[in-house]
Amino acid sequence: METKLRIAVQSKGRLYEETMELLSEAGVKMTSVKRTLLVPSRNFPVELLFLRDDDIPESVAMGTADIGIVGLNEVLEKDKAVEVIKDLGFSKCRLSLAIPKRIEYNGVEWFNNRKIATSYPVILKKFLNDNNINADIHVITGSVEIAPGIGLADGIFDIVSSGSTLVSNNLVEVEKVLESQAVLIGSSKNALSSEKQAILDELLFRFDAVKAADGKKYILMNVPREKLDEVLAVLPGIKSPTVLPLANADWCSVHTVLEEKRFWEIIGKLRAVGAEGILALDIEKMVL
Ligand code: ATP
Ligand code: MG
């Protein structure tokens, strides 16, 4: 039987969409078996094991799955024998302490002898220990943010992304404890077989190519030959852009790659020095 690398992924929730998108952009197509636990790819030697995100670190530590995709917050909270192989750059959030906004906050000592509600007791305990704070940790799963309002706790330790949940519960973020994002994890005890390691290496190579293309545009434009030097001076950091002849010998075509966030600034300059017929295309992958 063909060796398959088994990847534990979240079955539904905030990680699911972007995990599937990353795999798809890396050319890993899934058979469309909906809602079964274990789904093989139809064109790449991997299979996906769909789990709750809480169970992903352990499944990798135990070897039920070879690797997993999960939030760094879950990795640190579960404290299993796993290691981060790669930061994946999506599902970014942070774990923070927050308190009712009417309260005057004078530093982390405020939490001494207070009650803190959280779903992340392990990470919180470590932070409190590191800061010599002695507080009472109240573990609740879900809707942590309502705890201070109903008198269940003095403050909370929870996931924050935009902060709008805090605002609507009259809370204010006072300590940022952990920056989290989706990560690829592997076992820190069991080494992969050489066949599985080769599959993982190919996958990582493809993830890099997807990431390199992220936020970049492929730009083509027509430039009068006499303006070529001025146009090239405007293009940032390109060692040697592609310059192709056109049927009209007074003109040429220049191709290059731009950061999307600088697009309008640079396009403005290019037009000012005489570039015309500018096309911008999405880049799917970039192999550097
Ligand atoms: P499961 O049913 O799998 O246990 P869950 O309810 O525990 O799911 P989700 O809400 O789907 O978890 O969040 C999964 C992960 O996504 C979190 O552990 C965190 O890493 C990240 N995350 C959570 N909230 C946000 C957010 N608002 N913005 C970005 N990322 C987030
Ligand atoms: Mg969960």
Image (cartoon, rainbow, N blue to C red):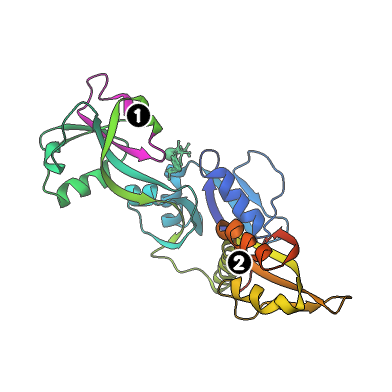
Disc with the residue nearer the chain's start (2 vs 1): 1
- Magenta-drawn segment: 141-163
Residue 152 position by quadrant:
top left
Q: Is residue 225 above or below residue 57?
A: below
Q: Quadrant of ligand 1?
A: top left
Is 256 above or below relative to 115?
Answer: below
Label 2 CA crowd tier, 10 Å (few <14, some 14–19, many 20+): some
Instruction: Examine the rendering and report whether any part of residue 86 can be seen.
Output: yes
**Residue 150 counted in the magenta span:** yes
Residue type at numbered disc 1: Val
Q: Residue under label 1, please give it.
A: 167
Disc 2 residue type (three-letter): Ala
- Magenta stretch: residue 59 in it? no
SS assignment at label 2: helix
Query: How many C-alpha atoms fall within 10 Å of the one at disc 1: few (<14), some, or many (≥20)?
Result: few
Quadrant position of the N terminus in the picture: bottom right
Residue 215 in view, yes or no = no
Q: Where in the figure is residue 16, as x and y percent of width and height?
A: 55, 44
Q: Nearer the viewer, residue 140 or 91?
A: 91
C-alpha distance separating marks 2 and 1 = 39 Å
Q: Image check: 62 left or right of 175?
A: right
Q: Position of residue 51 (x, y in %)?
A: 51, 43
Q: How many marks?
A: 2
In this rendering, the label closer to the viewer, 2 or 1: 1
Give left or right: position of 227 versus 120: right
Could you tell me which residue is drawn at 31 percent across and 30 percent down? 140
Q: Which residue is mark 2?
A: 209
Residue 116, quarter of the rendered image: top left
